[in-house]
């Protein structure tokens, strides 16, 4: 089963980018999912919906702590209808052929955020959602790496 995540990188990335599990560029997760479908089928499902919904800005809100024990520092993203529509459109395009391991964090419970890394965003920062990217969470069956498989930009 393939393990993927659809993200909006803070700084746009290119298809083919490979990075270590511990070295994620700053991003907003749009949807995390598993599927038995090929990456090509997933990409085709998203081709028809993503470009028309990209090209808007979001504002960074307050800091919070995520994770089971609250040990993951994040910057929340203030509510933005265009981001919610992007999330919802991606869920609908992926359909029932995918498994959502964090299903309770999707749909109306979607809480967009940017996990802190070596760098971080500050409350009040603005981020342009200029791109969505499909990331393979186990390229070549290696859980230590991540690979950007596809990117979409505004139509």
Image (spheres, rainbow, N blue to C red):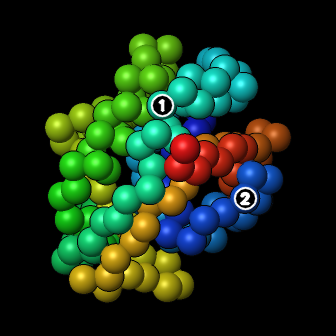
> Mark 1: few, some, or many residues within 10 Å (few <14, many ≥20)?
some
| Quarter of the rendering occupied by the N terminus | top right
The foreground one among 55 and 95 is 55
Q: Is residue 78 depicted above or below 111 in this figure?
A: below
Q: Is residue 94 left or right of residue 75?
A: right
Q: Is residue 77 left or right of residue 1?
A: left
The quarter of the picture where residue 89 lies is top left
Q: Is residue 51 depicted above or below 14 in this figure?
A: above
How many numbered dots are placed on residues in this image?
A: 2
Q: Which mark is residue 113?
A: none
Badge 2 marks a residue whose secondary structure is loop
The percent position of residue 57, horizontal first and vertical second, equals: 35, 65
Residue at 53% x, 49% y is 154
> Mark 2: few, some, or many residues within 10 Å (few <14, many ≥20)?
some
The percent position of residue 149, horizontal first and vertical second, equals: 72, 44
Q: Is residue 22 left or right of residue 130?
A: right
The foreground one among 100 and 110 is 110
The residue positioned farthest toward the top in the image shown: 96
- Spatial CA distance of label 1 from label 2 is 19 Å
Q: Is residue 113 left or right of residue 141?
A: left
The residue positioned farthest toward the front in the image shown: 155
The residue where tag 2 is placed is: 14
Tags 1 and 2 touching, CB below 8 Å: no
| Quarter of the rendering occupied by the C terminus | top right
The percent position of residue 38, horizontal first and vertical second, equals: 70, 22
Residue at 17% x, 37% y is 108
Q: Is residue 7 depicted above or below 38 in this figure?
A: below
The residue where tag 1 is placed is: 49
Residue at 45% x, 23% y is 93
Q: Could you tell which of marks 1 and 2 lies nearer the N-terminus?
A: 2
């Amino acid at each position: 089963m393939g393990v993927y995540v659809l993200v909006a990188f803070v700084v746009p990335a290119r298809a083919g980018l490979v990075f270590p599990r511990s070295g994620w560029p700053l991003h907003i997760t749009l949807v995390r999912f598993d599927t038995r479908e090929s990456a090509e089928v997933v990409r085709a499902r998203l081709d028809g919906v993503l470009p028309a919904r990209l090209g808007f800005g979001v504002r960074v809100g307050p800091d919070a702590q995520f994770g089971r024990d609250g040990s993951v520092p994040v910057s929340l993203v203030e509510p933005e209808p265009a981001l919610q529509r992007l999330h919802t459109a991606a869920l609908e395009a992926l359909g029932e052929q995918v498994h959502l391991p964090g299903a309770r964090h999707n749909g109306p419970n979607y809480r967009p955020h940017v996990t802190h890394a070596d760098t971080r965003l500050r409350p009040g920062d603005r981020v342009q959602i200029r791109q969505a990217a499909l990331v393979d969470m186990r390229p070549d069956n290696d859980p230590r790496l991540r690979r950007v498989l596809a990117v979409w930009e505004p139509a």
